Image (cartoon, rainbow, N blue to C red):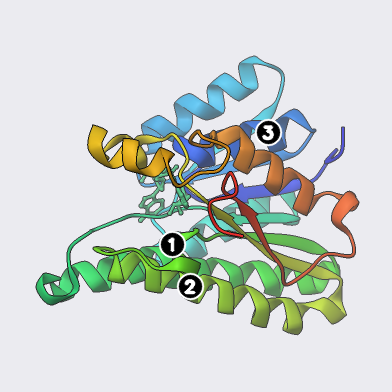
Amino acid sequence: MELENQIALVTGGGRGIGKTISETLASQGAQVYLGGTNLETAEETAKSIRDKGGKAFAICLDVSKREHIQNAFDLIVGEAGRLDILVNNAGITKDGLLVRMKEEDWDQVLEVNLKGAFLCSQLAVKQMMKQRSGNIVNISSIVGQAGNAGQANYTASKAALIGLTKTMALEAAPRGIRVNAIAPGFIETDMTGALNEKIREGLMGKIPLGKLGSSQNVADGVLFLVSDRADYITGQVLNINGGMLM
Ligand code: NDP
């Protein structure tokens, strides 16, 4: 058990990659709070973790709402007394070509993917500074590094997350807090399930390992980064992309 007695918050922990991250952290002994806008889904996932002997609780957390974030942190720190791990996983897409992109679609994606991570991290770092320890992992994306036609808002948010990761890592390192990012390639989830067959086929040709990734591939990266095995690693971006971008 690598994370015995550690307290973790995974935003968007109820489904997709966040669900597997939550399950993986819990399997290593962490007490995991699963945030989400859909409390029912988060509770279902939390219950399935508890049924397997893990410690997990669903929490109503829309990261685009400052008051939700404050309430979630008050609840976690009130109940558990600390926060050791924050995974900023919540993310949305609202795709469209730049020239047609609606301002509200730009704002919404930046609000959830970037500002949400900033606000959660701000409260997490304040708490972790008191503890003089902690780990934050931001889930960025391959397209934050390479760009992707039709995703100006999403790629900007994911590129900015990498900048945020590096600055937070610099500011928090003196207090024993590590901050890293993961840039997944194309992972089988609801998000990529929306891609049509033609796009999927095209993608395969660009992935040296010849397959989409699994949410477990990403969760294993998170587990590594938050564990003591990575205790000399901070401010880094771990690419989990089947070799698609090197
Ligand atoms: P899904 O669309 O399957 O799930 C999105 C998750 O984000 C859900 O858990 C959802 O929870 C949560 N979420 C959405 N909006 C909010 C919000 N306002 N507040 C809190 N939670 C929210 O996405 P994936 O699992 O595929 O993606 C997870 C992360 O990984 C995202 O940041 C994504 O950008 C990133 N990523 C994914 C890749 C992929 O190929 N799938 C590739 C690279 C990066 P709820 O339903 O409760 O709102």
Amino acid identity at mark 2:
Ala
Q: Earlier in the sequence, mark 1 or mark 3?
A: 3
Q: How many labels does the image show?
A: 3
Query: What is the number of the mark on residue 24?
Result: 3
Kind of element beneath mark 1: helix
Q: In which quarter of the image is residue 191?
A: top left
Q: Is mark 1 within 8 Å of ligand 1?
A: yes
232 relative position to 38: left or right: right
- In the image, residue 75 lies at what x, y percent? 58, 53
Q: Nearer the viewer, residue 45 or 104?
A: 104
Q: Which of 51 and 154 is in front in this view?
A: 154
Q: Which of marks 2 and 3 is nearer the N terminus?
A: 3
Q: Which of 24 and 9 is in front in this view?
A: 24
Q: Please give the residue where the numbered disc 2 appears in the rendered image.
A: 159
Residue at the spot 76% in from the left edge and 55% down from the top edge: 84
Report how far apart the C-alphas of labels 2 and 3 lie in the structure.
26 Å
In the figure, 159 relative to 92: above or below?
below
Q: Please give the residue where the numbered disc 1 appears in the rendered image.
A: 143
Amino acid identity at mark 3:
Thr
- Mark 2 or 3: in front is 2
103 relative position to 240: left or right: left
Kind of element beneath mark 2: helix
